[in-house]
Amino acid sequence: VDLSDNTNLFGAPPNALAGFRTSDSTRLTRYPSLYAGGLKRAIARYLSVDETNIVTGCGSDDVLDSTIRALCDPGDIVATSDPSFSMIPLHARMNGLHCEQAPLDAGLDIDADALLAAAARVTYMCSPNNPTGTLASRDAVERVIAGAPGVVILDEAYAEFTSESQAQRAAVSSNVLVVRMFSKAFGLAGLRIGYAVGAADLVNEVEKSRGPFKVNAPAEEAATVALTSDLEWMREKVAEVLYLREKFSVELKRLGLSPLPSSANFVMVPVTDANSVAARMRDRSVAVREFTSLPRIGDALRISIGPWDMMAEALAALEAALQ
Ligand SMILES: Cc1ncc(COP(=O)(O)O)c(C=O)c1O
């Protein structure tokens, strides 16, 4: 039972999967479209923005990396919260940049003043935040957008699990890029498809630094089908995750734990000595993601939410590991 990476544990979207299985062999022998134009149009319809506001990539990791490379020169600063998405400091380093990490505030909200103090070329925020699952307050997000000297990336990898999104606003802002993907709610992590929404000039710069042919042909086809024919499936699975997340959190509390309030498809739960708890859970064939010495939180486990039989196994393994 692998609950370590926040993917869709209910499976792949059915129509996208059916199309993938019967895909024409020219999908493999020929190059894909240069810049995934068909997918951009489908995303634009999904989010009610214009296709010129979209850039796609090989997973949102690729979009984040290309954005940082497009907007920064070696030696510049990228600012992010701590804890937040663990790839940001790595993308910064790989592009020759310094990463300033500002701890979340005492309420686990983004600390706008601390982020702004970095005066970064690119300021990164993630909401709902990975790994905490917490939603950033509107006040903090607005203060960062208003005060940041450079571009603000708002990572909405888990937006489908909330009713909050700044995607439409990003399309008409000059300095906000909203990053989204197909790896979580849409169940297509293996196909590697991510995208960002922003002003046409801004996404164009990201596209130039990313280059052509980054979304492969079967991936573009599957994501386009998912957006046109699997939205109902996706929304049903999201509703199920939200219900199971609350049920799971109640059980965690019954074990004497204090899960953080989550707005995503996973729950972070502080524990003593996360490494050994996670290792003991792995001995019982349950994988979760362990974190140690997080600012404000300490040691914790991040546990994806899936069908209840998986969650029941996770609970049993956790209960045994805690003893
Ligand atoms: C917040 C966040 N952003 C980006 C990513 C990268 O996802 P992908 O490259 O699969 O689109 C992840 C993956 O876990 C994530 O949690």
Image (tube, rainbow, N blue to C red):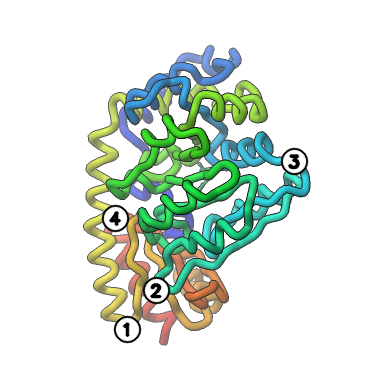
Residue behind label 2 places its C-beta within 8 angstroms of ligand 1: no
Q: CA distance from mark 1 to mark 4?
A: 23 Å
Amino acid on which disc 4 is placed: Pro
* Other residues around mark 3 within 10 Å, as few (<14) / some (14–19) / many (≥20): few
Secondary structure under the numbered disc 2 in the rendered image: helix
Res. 118 in view: yes
The residue indicated by pointer 4 is 307
- State the residue position of label 2: 317
Q: Position of residue 283 (x, y in %)?
A: 50, 72
Q: CA distance from mark 1 to mark 2?
A: 15 Å
Q: Secondary structure at mark 3?
A: loop
Using the numbered discs, state the Cα–Cα distance from disc 2 to disc 3 in whole angstroms: 47 Å
Counting residues from the N terminus, which is met first, the one under dot 3 or under dot 1? 3
How many residues crowd around disc 2 within 10 Å: few (fewer than 14), some, or many (20 or more)? many
Looking at the image, is 51 positioned above or below residue 236?
above
Q: Which numbered disc, 1 or 2, marks the residue closer to the eye?
A: 1
- Which residue appears at 49% of the width and 66% of the height? 104
Instruction: Tell me if 61 is positioned left or right of 129 in this view.
Output: right
In this orientation, which residue lies closer to the viewer: 148 or 21? 148
Tell me the CA gap for discs 4 and 2: 16 Å
Label located before the other in sequence (1 or 4): 1
Q: Residue furthest bottom?
A: 323
Residue 175: x %, y % from top left: 52, 38
From the image, tell me which residue sits under label 3. Answer: 73
Q: Earlier in the sequence, mark 1 or mark 2?
A: 1
Which amino acid type is shown beneath numbered disc 1?
A: Gly
Mark 2 vs mark 3: give the one in front: 3
First in sequence: mark 4 or mark 2? Answer: 4
Residue beneath the point at 45% across and 65% down: 302
The residue to which callout 1 is attached is 256
Disc with the residue nearer the chain's start (3 vs 4): 3
How far across and down, in percent of the image, does residue 241 sit? 28, 53
